[in-house]
Amino acid sequence: MRKRLSALALAVVTALSLAACGGQTGGTSTSGSSDTQAAASSGQTIKIVCPYGVGGTADAIARKYAVVANKHSDYNFIVENMTGGDGFQAANWYTDQDPSTTDLLVYGFGVAYRHDLGKTYQTEVVDFDRNDIYPVADIDDRTWMVYAKAGTTLADVLEKAKNGGIKMSGGNPLSDPHLALGSLLALEGGTVMTVPYDGGAAQKKGLTDGEVDVFVGTTQAAIEDVEAGTIVPILAFAENTMTFKGPDGDIVAPGVGGEGMAPELDPSKDYSGSILPGGGFIAVRTGADQAWIDEIIEISKAVWADPEYSDWISEIMLNRNELYGEDAKAFEEEGCAKALAAFKLLSGQQ
């Protein structure tokens, strides 16, 4: 465990030191291809904009990607955090950039989901068009987990959800964790309310302090807490089980379908709609030069092929799901369709 956490800490510290010496990249030129080729020949700094704060899963992955990408290219990749609106501020900023920009965006499924919900159901104001963002490579594929305080079972949570409702931390209302749990509970005749917190540490503290009943987050976000026995994983939004190291040995969290389905769930019901793609992509502005897209794809393939990245992803229990270009775009569209269906279910519109 110490080795795994040390690797994560080293990745963040190393990339932070790289970020400290980074500069701005061009985003106003209209010459497109010539600017991109100039970037290739100059070895210039390439900024990766992460819409979330330092220390979270998305930030850690972006920084590890930058460190490894620097080994496999002539560029100096750095990470810059641009927080606000749970990803919306960075998306707004990025879609205002010229397609010729060499800045990259960490583009999450949650932003795409909320964009579509806002546009379709007016759940919130959306000032950008996600079609202006093109996912180039899937670098973060995560399984959402439901965590509870030690001694709390899935049966306890389901019962409370059916009798007055439960509270959860993990993202904002209509975030992908909320859509996943909310749609599952709707099938069970239960309800959930999201209590927003600023960051994963606060979300977990809300659980341990008894302010919420469950925390829905990534595997990486709670590995240390589960091993310490502070919280326990009680459900994985997956067709398989997820195994964590606990203080007294392995803890197996059941899934929502397949052979690993939780026995507390109704086997006659289909919960697969709650398995929403999570994580996100390295993205460019739609309209970027194809040569630049192809180069980022090749760099991303090299990153995945490097054990420094792929083994680390495995250590923090994320999934290896390599998708590039149009395949990545199709995966985004598939996820957005599932998110709209999940919203209809949890909101009682179907």
Image (cartoon, rainbow, N blue to C red):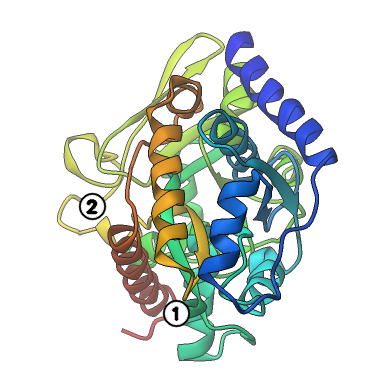
Amino acid under disc 1? Ser
Q: Residue at x 53, y 74 (%)?
A: 114
Q: Quadrant of the N terminus?
A: top right
Q: Which mark is residue 192?
A: none
x then y, percent, for residue 248: 51, 8
Q: Residue at x 60, y 10 (%)?
A: 3
Q: Is 329 placed left or right of 229 in the picture?
A: left
Residue 99 in view (yes/no): yes
Estimate the spatial distance between the alpha carbons at disc 2 and disc 1, rounded to whole Å: 21 Å
> Which corner quadrant of the image does residue 82 belong to?
bottom right
User: In terms of depth relative to the viewer, which is nearer, 118 or 64?
Assistant: 64
Q: Say above or below: 93 vs 233.
A: below
User: In terms of depth relative to the viewer, which is nearer, 7 or 45?
Assistant: 45
Q: Which residue is mark 1?
A: 347
Q: Say above or below: 305 vs 75.
A: above
Q: Is 26 placed left or right of 336 in the picture?
A: right
Q: Which residue is mark 2?
A: 266
Amino acid under disc 2? Asp
User: In terms of depth relative to the viewer, which is nearer, 288 or 193?
Assistant: 288
x then y, percent, for residue 267: 18, 50
In the rendered image, the residue lying farthest to the right is 20
Q: Is 47 placed left or right of 111 in the picture?
A: right
> Disc 2 on helix, strand or loop?
loop
